[in-house]
């Protein structure tokens, strides 16, 4: 049996043990108060710092597979080291994804926090934030390295229980769909939601704009026979997807018709306009929007750059605020509840939206 196959079997076995423990309330695995605190910190940050989960699972798994391996030596070029990235990419991240746990797109070792060529000992210089999470990660690794293999199994089992509990809470969370809100009240709540301090918040204005365009595409003559493309994954680069913006609309012939680039707390500048123009200059797009959640009092300063693009390309480039655009577009649809339904559906199904952001939406939508 290959190491990869054995690794998958080990993870599945420990996962099933964790499921049983979770369902029978048998989550007390005899850890010290300090150990339990460190594990709880990792579980607390499982969505915000997914790389920590991926790397820690990989190191603990490696200790079980190869008890004599110093798991702090996470790179093959280290004397006595191994390739943690390979084991993560081939086994750990796909396994986490299959169980619907927070996971990286490829590997935790692709983040700056973990890619540095230093052992994972207490002198590791990588910027794992916050500090308490770095301390928890390095302490668990050190403890697993010094202890017997069963300790790594227990650590994995406890981490799985935490992930299962969080996954079930996330699945059972029902998102608010407020009714009887005026357009101004709705936009006010959206702005509050977009301004939540969370790494995934930059995705929210993209979801809001895609939601309103979904409704407009159904209801307005402008988009008759047009196709609003599904959103790309939050981590997909424009150059890779070959799309000009975050949101893209094709006309009836499949030609690029309208695009939207959405910025979160980023000011619009002449340089940004020129960068956006480079993306569309070889395309037949008719209208291209650059929208931001950053507050601008006046957009007139960008008029010369916009007029130059219109003369040289023919594209009508529009710069504006996300809030102003939503206020205008919401007035064009028959019922704001249609928009709310699509927006909430996006929140429920988009991988970039964390449990915290969903919970924030409920608090803002109902209590504001």
Image (spheres, grey):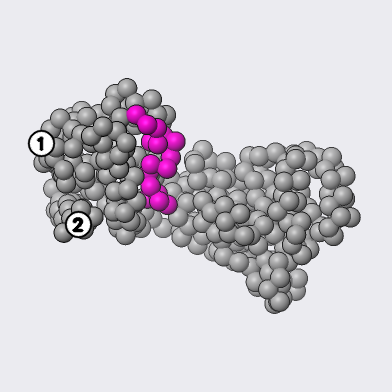
| Membership of 173 in magenta stretch | no
Task: Give the farthest residue toward the top.
Answer: 123
Main secondary structure of the magenta stretch: loop
- Front position in the image: 275 or 102: 275
Image position, residue 82 (x, y; %):
26, 40
Q: Is residue 136 above or below residue 256?
A: above
Helix, strand or loop status at disc 1: loop
Q: Residue at x 51, y 60 (%)?
A: 346
Which residue in the protein does label 1 denote?
Answer: 148
Q: Which mark is residue 330?
A: none
Magenta-drawn stretch contains 104: yes
Residue at which label 2 appears: 2
Q: Position of residue 254 (x, y in %)?
A: 68, 73
Which quarter of the rendering shows the N terminus?
bottom left
Decide if residue 326 is in sight here.
no
In this rendering, position of residue 167 left or right of residue 324: left
């Amino acid at each position: 049996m290959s190491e990869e196959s054995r690794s998958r079997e080990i993870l599945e076995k420990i996962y099933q043990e964790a499921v049983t423990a979770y369902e029978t309330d048998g989550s007390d695995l005899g850890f010290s108060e300090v150990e339990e605190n460190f594990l709880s910190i990792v579980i607390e940050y499982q969505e915000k710092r997914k790389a920590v989960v991926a790397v820690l699972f990989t190191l603990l798994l490696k200790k079980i597979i190869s008890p004599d391996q110093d798991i702090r030596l996470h790179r093959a070029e280290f004397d006595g080291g191994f390739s943690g990235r390979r084991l993560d990419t081939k086994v750990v991240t796909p396994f986490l994804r299959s169980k619907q746990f927070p996971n990286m797109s490829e590997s935790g070792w692709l983040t700056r926090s973990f890619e540095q060529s230093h052992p994972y000992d207490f002198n590791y210089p990588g910027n794992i934030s916050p500090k308490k999470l770095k301390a928890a990660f390095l302490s668990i690794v050190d403890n697993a390295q010094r202890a017997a293999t069963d300790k790594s199994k227990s650590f994995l089992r406890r981490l799985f229980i935490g992930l299962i509990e969080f996954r079930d809470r996330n699945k059972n969370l029902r998102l608010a769909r407020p009714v009887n809100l005026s357009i101004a009240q709705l936009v006010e709540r959206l702005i509050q939601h977009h301004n939540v301090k969370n790494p995934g918040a930059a995705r929210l204005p993209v979801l809001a704009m895609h939601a309103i365009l979904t409704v407009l595409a159904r209801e307005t003559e402008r988009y008759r026979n047009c196709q609003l493309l599904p959103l790309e994954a939050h981590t997909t680069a424009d150059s890779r997807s070959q799309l000009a913006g975050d949101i893209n609309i094709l006309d009836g012939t499949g030609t690029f018709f309208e695009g939207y680039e959405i910025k979160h707390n980023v000011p619009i500048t002449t340089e940004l306009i020129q960068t956006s123009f480079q993306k569309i200059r070889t395309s037949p797009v008719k209208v291209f929007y650059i929208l931001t959640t950053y507050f601008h009092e006046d957009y007139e300063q960008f008029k010369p750059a916009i007029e130059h693009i219109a003369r040289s390309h023919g594209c009508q480039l529009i710069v504006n605020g996300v809030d102003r655009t939503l206020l205008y577009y919401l007035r064009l649809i028959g019922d704001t509840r249609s928009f709310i339904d699509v927006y909430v559906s996006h929140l429920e199904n988009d991988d970039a939206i964390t449990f915290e952001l969903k919970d924030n939406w409920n608090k803002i939508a109902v209590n504001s």
